Image: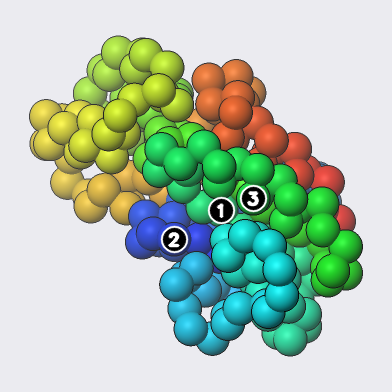
Amino acid sequence: MDILLVAEGKHEFHGALEELVRRLLPAGTAISRVEKLKMSNPEIGHVSGRGPRLTRRILSCMRKALQLNCQALVLLIDEDGDRERRGFVDEAQKSGVFLVQRAVGIAIRTFDAWMLADEVAISGVLGKIVECQPAPEEIGDPKGVFEGLHAAAGCGMAVHESYAAIARSARIEILVKRCEHGFGPFAGRVGRLHD
């Protein structure tokens, strides 16, 4: 399967999001190619017409996936405290405008919250016991919290490398349970993609 992966930030693109996607796909699904584009990339363009700008932007990503001969689009954005974004993401997921498989997701509040969900994985990556972080989706600044844990541990790898390592070792069931509004639906959508 060829996949177009679209996200907003550098931490997602340095391996963490792709690692999660590979783990969430149905068993035996082979990925032959992953194309990556930032949501802000002008190559994506905008689908003209009515409807919210974000929904039309996501539809443009679907069109781009087809242009790149990808069988699936995996797109993740952050909620960033804007609860309306959830509805736009769900609307785009259900759209029949472009016939491409898709897993459109939203991280509550940001992708960084997912990296705080499994203290066992964090502890293993940082080499220091980290306590269970309370309600990751409710943390106001999950990136800042992780960076604080990372600095306190004196970890020798960059934050984006730590994220990729956590994505490889995190217990998926814990992420689904502790990030039920963002990761849970996203995991289900990726799990329904097929060759």
Q: Is residue 37 above or below residue 192?
A: below
Q: Quadrant of residue 14?
A: bottom left
Q: Are marks 2 and 1 in contact (CB under 8 Å)?
A: yes
Residue that carries the numbered disc 1 in the rendered image: 76
Residue identifier under label 2:
8
Q: Tag 2: residue type?
A: Glu
Q: Residue 108 at x, y = what percent?
A: 48, 35
Q: CA distance from mark 1 to mark 3?
A: 12 Å
Question: Residue 125 — which label?
Answer: none
Residue 114 position, x and y percent, is 46, 34
Q: Earlier in the sequence, mark 1 or mark 3?
A: 1
Q: Are marks 1 and 3 in contact (CB under 8 Å)?
A: no
Is residue 193 visible to us here?
A: yes
Circle 3 SS class: helix
Q: Earlier in the sequence, mark 2 or mark 1?
A: 2
Q: Quadrant of the C terminus?
A: bottom right
* Residue situated in front as seen by the camera: 69 or 127: 69
Q: Is residue 172 visible?
A: no
Q: CA distance from mark 3 to mark 2?
A: 16 Å
Cα–Cα span, label 2 and label 1: 7 Å
Residue beneath label 3, please?
A: 88
Question: Callout 2 environment at 10 Å: few (<14), some (14 to 19), or many (20+)?
Answer: some
